[in-house]
Image (tube, rainbow, N blue to C red):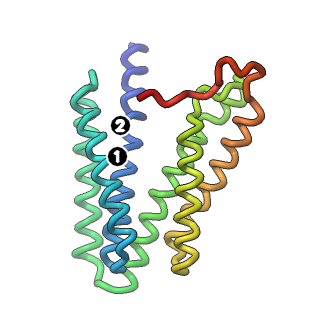
Amino acid sequence: MLELYCVWIHAWFLCVSPLVSVHSNLGWLYYGMLKKDGTLIIVNSIGASLQSLYILTYCHYTKTRRLVWVQTFTASIVLCGAWVYFSLFLTQGESQLSQLGFACSVFTVSMYLSPLTDLMEIVRSRSVERLSFPLTVATFLTSTSWTLYGLQLQDYYIMVPNTPGIITSLVRFFLFWKFSPVSLDKPTYKLIQI
C-alpha cells in the first residue's frame, strides 16, 4: 500500500507540474491574444506546445497511465470551463482582461512557489540534491526577463507574478552557496542528463 502511495505521489508531481505549466501558457496565450501582444502569443504558443508534448510523452511511457490520463482529463475539463467563463460569460474589455490577467498571475505564482515545498528537507538534510542548478538559473533569467517586460509595458499582471520567481531563485542560489560540497569531485545538485 505504501509503495502504491509513493508511486501515486511521484506520478502526481511529474504530471501535475506540466499540467499547471500548460494551463499557465494557454492562459497567457489568450491574454496575449486579447491584448494583441505578439511576444506573449509567440512565447506561450511555443511553451504550450512543448508542455503538451512533454505530457503526451510522459503519458506514453509512464507505468501509471490511468492516473496520468485521469489527471490530464480533469485538467482539460478545468481548462474548458475556464475558456467558457472567460469567453462567454464575461463581456469583452477591461473586465475580461483584468480577470484573465489575475487568473494567469495566480498560475504563474503557483509555478514559481512550488519548488519551495522542498526547502525544509533541503535545510534539514543540508543537501541540495533535490534542486537543479541549471533549472534555477533558467528560472531566474526567465522570471527576470518577464518582470522587466511587464515593467516596460506597465502591465502589473505580467510584472508582479514573475517577481516571486526572482525571489525563489535567489533563495535557491543561497541554498546552493550555503550547502555546496566541500569536495568538488561530486556536485550536490542534479546534473541534466541528455
Q: Are marks 1 and 2 in contact (CB under 8 Å)?
A: yes
Q: Is residue 144 above or below residue 134?
A: below
Name the spot of residue 18 as percent of width and height, x first: 37, 44
Residue at position x 27%, y 57% from top? 79
Snapshot quadrant of residue 120: top right
Q: Residue 95 carries which label?
A: none
Amino acid at pointer 1:
Leu
Q: Is mark 2 on a helix, strand or loop?
A: helix
Residue at position x 23%, y 39% from top? 56
Examine the rendering and report whether any part of residue 165 can be seen.
yes
In screen coordinates, is 158 left or right of 133? left
Quarter holding the N terminus is top left
Snapshot quadrant of residue 127: top right
Q: Is mark 1 on a helix, strand or loop?
A: helix
Amino acid at pointer 2:
Cys
Residue at position x 73%, y 24% from top? 181
Residue identifier under label 2: 15
In screen coordinates, is 177 left or right of 51? right
Name the spot of residue 60 as percent of width and height, x first: 21, 30
Examine the rendering and report whether any part of residue 96 can be seen.
no
Residue identifier under label 1: 19
Quarter holding the C terminus is top left
Disc 2 crowd, CA 10 A, few/some/many (<14, 14-19, 20+): many
Disc 1 crowd, CA 10 A, few/some/many (<14, 14-19, 20+): many
Q: Which of 183 and 96 is in front in this view?
A: 183
Q: Which of 135 and 4 is in front in this view?
A: 135
